[in-house]
Image: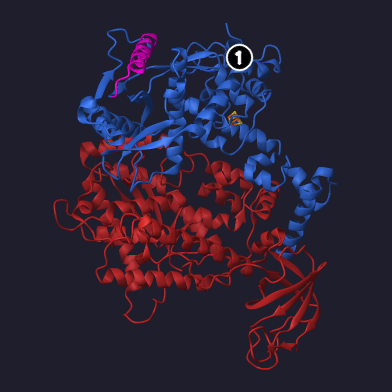
Chain colours: A blue, B red
Amino acid sequence: MSRLDPVRGSAEPVEHNARTIAALAVNPGCDRRAVLDAAGVDKRKTARHLGRSGAFGRSPFAQSRENSFADLVKADGAAHLLRLLRERFGLSLSEVAYVDVSDAGADRRAEVRHARTRTELARAAEGRETTGTLFDNPMLKLDVAGYEVYLEPRVIAFQVRGRFHVVEIKSFPIVDDQADAAQVSAAARQSAVYVHAMRCVFADLGLDPGRVSHEVLLVCPKDFANHPTAALIDVRPQLSVLRRQLARLKRIDHILDGLPAGFTLDLRPDAAGTPTRPAAELRTALTTVEARYAPECLDSCEMAFFCRDEARAADRVEALGRSVREELGGLESVAAVLALADGTASPTDDQQEIAARLRHVQLLYAEAVA
Amino acid sequence: MSVLTSLMRARAVRRGRALPVATVRHLHLSPRPLVFVPLRLAGEAAAPLGAMVGADPADPRLLVVPQPRNRELRFAFMAELAEVVLTYLDGFGAEPAGGERFADAPQILVPNPKGIAFIRLLGRSTRFRRPDGPYPVPPSVPRLGTWLTFLAERGEHAGSSLLVALTQALGAHWATGQSAVEDGNLAAQLGWIDPPPGLTGPEAADAAEDPLRTPPAGPDTDPGFDRLVLERSIAAYDESGSPGQVRAALRTQLEPTWASMWQAVELLRRLPDAGSVAGRWERDRTAFTREYRRLAEGGAPQGRRDGAVGAAHRLARLEAAQQEFAAQCAFDDPLAMVEHLLSGKAFRGTVVEVDAARRIVPPGGKRASCRPLVVVEAADPVLIPPGKTVRSPRRPRQRAEILRIEGNRVTLQLLDGMGRAAVPEPGSVPEHGQSVCYADLDLGGGRRPPLPALEETPWTHGGPPAEYVPTDDDALEAWS
Ligand code: SF4
């Protein structure tokens, strides 16, 4: 049994997918999130039980649009995709083979499909054909804090001239060769998870992980039509953040060592799955693990409202945003900022500069609004 | 984010209420703006779902697309929207030809920057359509698309007021006790600035963050609403052909934002116009007039994308507009000047010596001219090097050259703005004992960036761009 099981308690660990793993990397400095995620605690349920759940969740329309576009791209033996790959990599019609990895027979279990994915990738990697091969429905595996997480990408791996590329299908459009920057970077974070997982498979097989390219082929609708187009994106920055965060989760023991004996985030669900643990008790347990709240959490972590309450109650400047905190000389509490600006507290040696600045601003402000 | 705004955010936390960070309003506010709150279907690029639009707070027009995946219905929506928006625009362009610009111009207000991005996409997806051919649309649809494109592009110019996102407008004038991320929610931002009676700022903002109590201001709808209400309403339409349920559902999502929009307008209206607002609005009027006349003469919709040089010109223009706007704000508003005082691009002080009668023969000149000397004892450290010309908010047209800086004593030589006579006009030279402020800020004034003209685009950048001629392909582009 892992040390993390008692932290989660009796519930099954929540399943990770590329989206949740990508989200891990958004606030890498947060111990609270590291513990919650490593233990597989259901953050959404936890937040709801504390009465602080936000507007998370996806619209069914977004979901169905994503599915229908992916179906279109993969229809007829991935005809659209083969066309894009030929265009992109300058291959002729006969040069691209198609392998459906999920064709493994009746046994649909993840381990079986993962084993088959490995075999197929190994075969392709050892062969030296100059033709391309497209792998549909691969099953990848990743170690997240000592747990094996299976990733079933709607994504496809493509091998050409000995190099492998991850292909990611997204339903946001590329209009006149431009796409929404936020959506592209979210896609890059997710693709990085697949690239990383595929590199792990390669390393495991004794192959050079560098053969999995950091360039991901992003397939999106072109303009306003349903017609797929593609662009290569470089996911190196996302990869390095992800690697760091996964390594950190492996060192979760350090964080656990600092927690009191018997520490648990168990919701104590009853037979129907309804949490029975007193909310106040759960709140106390959560607050023993240090958080590092910033407004970016609002878009990336289900615990955000809870952590924001805590940050605000503690008068933390960080709740106003990282750039505000930087402007205010890194001071931690609102009270400290105001005391220095009002001159009611004397600054320490390393606060002299920011104190003078704040008093100056305060004076100019008072003059201007007078 | 400036230190001033950051400090005021901290103060707002303590006070439980937003604080002003501007003493005047830096944008033009029309007496009759058109408020537009668009919604789109989640997961789709430019599928409108509905909108509330109008120039009268008491009489919004609700437009809906009962089945947003149906292309015909989408164009019907665009035609209805065109009716409202084009009627509004034509109200400003109906003047007889002649003068350089119309007396007034339209102003469209949307809740947030995403609303502007959506307008851009709507414009892009409709401006190439044609009233004839295989997929005919009403002629008003491409015309609307062209206008939306124009507005979205103009909206990128700092200080332009033809198309304004109200969260940004409010954020430029008030610091709330929350972060910029949360200020993206119009209702929450308003909660801090102008909470309803009996509530503190944070309490009001908290209520505004609950999508059940306060639906989001769009263009994205609340996923919970999509799941629990919208999906069913659209299915009902598919079955019965009656849009009633979708209309009712979208009304609940749009009405609160409609009210917030006008509340924001009222708040902004209470601020006096900044000095340079009229000048900037004049340029907006000129731009609108030109586009109006261009289209009236049968001008084509804007092309798909700028070429390399076109894009560089555009960027340079936007940057120049940004600098100029920042400078004008600082000259109009002592709170906007604070940032420059802190960075050393401006200084304040007291006039301690004046030689108003000084006349010299300027280098390269022939006759003696007025060049009064003014010595200022600066209250702030002066980081501007001697030789630079600076200006004062009190006399923005007058240039002063820094001759020497000794300790905190700055010696300035006035270069112009004193009239044509042999002695300076009364009041044109600062007086002994006066407090003054001088800044090294570029107020613009029409200097063009040193870039090749479009016709001279080097071959390395693709050569001169062909002028955009609408093609059949563009007109037939699918919008599925
Ligand atoms: S919301 Fe809380 S738990 Fe989640 S990342 Fe932010 S600080 Fe950590």
In the picture, which quadrant includes the C terminus of chain A? Answer: bottom right
Quick one: A149 or A277, which is closer to the camera? A149
Helix, strand or loop at mark 1? helix
Quick one: B408 or B271, which is closer to the camera? B408
- On whether residue B330 falls in the magenta region, the answer is no
Mark 1 Cα-neighbour bin, 10 Å: few <14, some 14–19, many ≥20 = many
Q: Position of residue B406 (x, y in %)?
A: 82, 69
Kindly indicate the quadrant of the structure image that contains residue A247.
Answer: top right
Q: Residue at x 28, y 63 (%)?
A: B467
Q: Indicate whether B274 appears above or below A133.
A: below
Kindly indicate the quadrant of the structure image that contains residue A307.
Answer: top right
Q: Position of residue B95 (x, y in %)?
A: 33, 78
The single residue placed furthest to the bottom in the displayed view is: B422
Kindly indicate the quadrant of the structure image that contains residue B415.
Answer: bottom right
Q: Which residue is mark 1?
A: A7
In the picture, which quadrant includes the N terminus of chain A? Answer: top right
Q: Position of residue B431 (x, y in %)?
A: 77, 82
The single residue placed furthest to the top in the displayed view is: A1
The numbered mark 1 sits on a residue in which chain? A
Q: Indicate whether B413 appears above or below B328.
A: below
Amino acid tagged 1: Val
Q: Position of residue B247 (x, y in %)?
A: 32, 46
Inspect this view and state whether residue A370 appears: no
Q: Residue at x 59, y 51 (%)?
A: B195
Q: Left of A220 or right of it: where is B480?
A: left
Q: Left of B131 or right of it: where is B433?
A: right
For ligand 1, the image quadrant comes to top right
Residues in magenta? A111-130
